[in-house]
Image: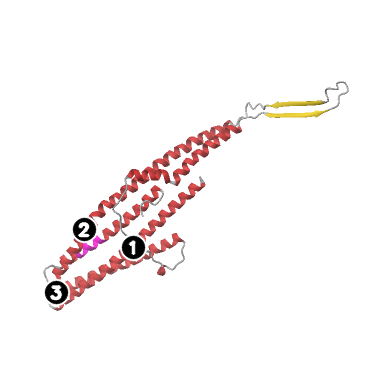
Amino acid sequence: MASSQHQDLERNLLFSLRSQFVQTLQAKAVLELARQELDYYDHLIDISRERYSKGDIAQIDLDRIELQRVQYESDLQTAEVNLRTSKIQLLILLNDRTPVEQFDVTGPFDFLDQLQPLDAFRQIALDTRPDLKAALESVQQANTNHKLAVANGSTDPTLGAWYTYNPSFSNPYANQTLGLSVSIPLRIFDRNQGEKARTQLDIGRNQRLSDAIHAQVFGDVDSAYAQIDSNLILLRPYKAKYLMQATRVRDTVTYAYQRGGASLLDLLNAQSDYRNVQLAYLQLIGSYLTAASQLNLAVGREVIQ
């Protein structure tokens, strides 16, 4: 039981570590997106200044474009703070004294479009979950304690034997004596009845707890599976269509604006839509990886890396 409970503690600690690692990867990806967005917007500002110098746009339009840059600067600073905070939390979990400026993480920030059937994960959880093992072992321990209580309430006969050699002058054939004895205690009232009843109740209690953990295992697996399946349903169209469409719309509107074929509002809307789609995609990947960690926690071992 102690070994199973120790494994369960490791399982939960590993989940916390994986979740923080995913948050750090997500913060790193969002920071990179913020930098790219700021660089691209600076390119738009350069285009607008060139158009203003040629008299294609008014001063007010140029001012509106340049004022919009503060939003991208704010997003960049927020992303840097979030990444630093995530690194600090990860270092605490790792018990690492590396300065945060020298610490970095790397790993695939993507999703796998493959998922086993739900029944396969359920069976793995039943075979692997250490808390379920500990619950089953507690039932075995309760049965053993009850058998011990029954044994302590029983009485064992005491057997004895002796041999003596005594000279007998009246009977020369009675010099050697062999004897046997049997002693049986009569425990009429003290039969350990209270401990028997307590251990019998403890068996039922541990069985109910085992049933509850068994149901909890199924609930954890089903919940994590539903979450990761939902994320996959959303991620597939993003990767197959929405990301390319957002990029194409932004580049097309930027090209048209550069040549006077699109308005300033169209340009800002296209840039905002592109940013929203990219950010939503990164958040979905982060949710997918967190759900994958949750499924690993529910199953009890690594099933999705």
Q: In which image quadrant can residue 104 be found?
A: bottom left
Q: Are marks 2 and 1 in contact (CB under 8 Å)?
A: no
**Rendered location of residue 218, percent (x, y):** 37, 43
Nearer to me, 46 or 170: 170
User: Which quadrant of the figure contains the C terminus?
Assistant: bottom left
Residue 274 shown in magenta: yes
- Which of the numbered marks, if any, corresponds to residue 224? none
Residue 150 is at least partly visible in this image: yes
**Rendered location of residue 253, percent (x, y):** 15, 66
Span highlighted in magenta in the image: 270-278
Q: CA distance from mark 2 to mark 1?
A: 22 Å
Mark 3, residues whose alpha carbon is within 10 Å: few (<14), some, or many (≥20)? few
- Give the residue number, with chain letter if any, for mark 2: 242
Q: Is residue 152 left or right of residue 248?
A: right
- Give the residue number, with chain letter if any, for mark 1: 27
Q: Could you tell me which secondary element the residue under label 1 belongs to?
A: helix
N-term mark: 2 or 1: 1
Q: Nearer the viewer, mark 3 or mark 2?
A: 2
Query: Which amino acid type is shown beneath numbered disc 3?
Result: Ala
Q: Could you tell me which secondary element the residue under label 2 belongs to?
A: helix
Q: Is residue 267 left or right of residue 164?
A: left
Q: Nearer the viewer, mark 3 or mark 1?
A: 1
Residue 304 shown in magenta: no
Q: Residue at x 50, y 38 (%)?
A: 140
Q: CA distance from mark 3 to mark 1?
A: 38 Å
Mark 2, residues whose alpha carbon is within 10 Å: few (<14), some, or many (≥20)? some
**Rendered location of residue 117, percent (x, y):** 31, 45
N-term mark: 3 or 2: 3
**Rendered location of residue 241, percent (x, y):** 20, 57
- Which of the numbered marks, if any, corresponds to residue 58? 3
Q: Could you tell me which secondary element the residue under label 3 belongs to?
A: loop
